[in-house]
Amino acid sequence: MCFQLAVCASCVLGEWKDDKRTGRGTSSWTTGNKYVGDYENDRKHGHGTYIFASGNKYDGEWKDDRMNGQGTFSWSNGDKYEGEWKDDKMTGRGRLNWSNGNKYEGEWKDDKMTGRGTFLWTNGDIYDGQWKDSKQYGKGVMTNANGTRHEGWWKDGMRC
């Protein structure tokens, strides 16, 4: 069944309980966004796929209407993150592959590389070590594509 909601127009198909979406369902909005997945008490909860009008897509776990748990976010430009989410943000362990070939695998907090991780640039340079706010910060090792190795301390992306 389809409903016109007062706040925004949408079409909602799926299972209902006590006038709330509960179980499997599909929601489509006039903005072009679409969600197919599990609901609990009228909120995205469980596994589901959200496709944005922009072409971005999230496929993974939801809790209380937010991306929580394991999931994959694919941007329309080809960037792709696979890993843990908390309250709609990359938080925990994860891997981001940029469309330009750069790669990072490690810890995340609030959408930023924070904690231990390894970054591989397309030119072959590799940094393995600590990160803070998406910058090298703390103990780490930079190995350049030519084999030159720099081990030491970093702050705000610069070697100390």
Image (cartoon, rainbow, N blue to C red):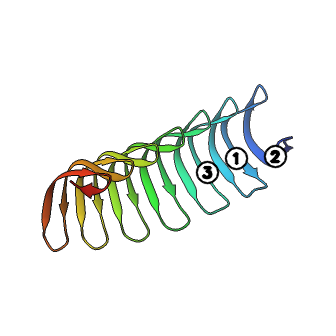
Residue at 61 percent across and 51 percent down: it is: 50
Between tags 2 and 1, which lies in front? 2
Amino acid carrying mark 1 in the image: Thr
Which circle's residue, 1 or 3, is located before the other in the chain?
Answer: 1
Q: Which mark is residue 87?
A: none
Q: Secondary structure at mark 1?
A: strand
Residue at 74 percent across and 51 percent down: it is: 28
Instruction: From the viewer's perspective, tell me whether residue 72 is left or right of residue 97.
Output: right
Pointers 2 and 3 in contact (CB under 8 A)? no
Within 10 Å of disc 2 (Cα), the crowding (few <14, some 14-19, many 20+) is few
Residue ID for mark 3: 50
Q: Which mark is residue 8?
A: 2
Within 10 Å of disc 3 (Cα), the crowding (few <14, some 14-19, many 20+) is many
Q: Secondary structure at mark 3?
A: strand
Which circle's residue, 2 or 1, is located before the other in the chain?
Answer: 2
Which circle's residue, 2 or 3, is located before the other in the chain?
Answer: 2
**What is the CA distance from the residue labelled 2 to the residue labelled 3?**
17 Å
Expressed as whole percent of the image width and height from the top left, the position of residue 72 reads: 47, 52
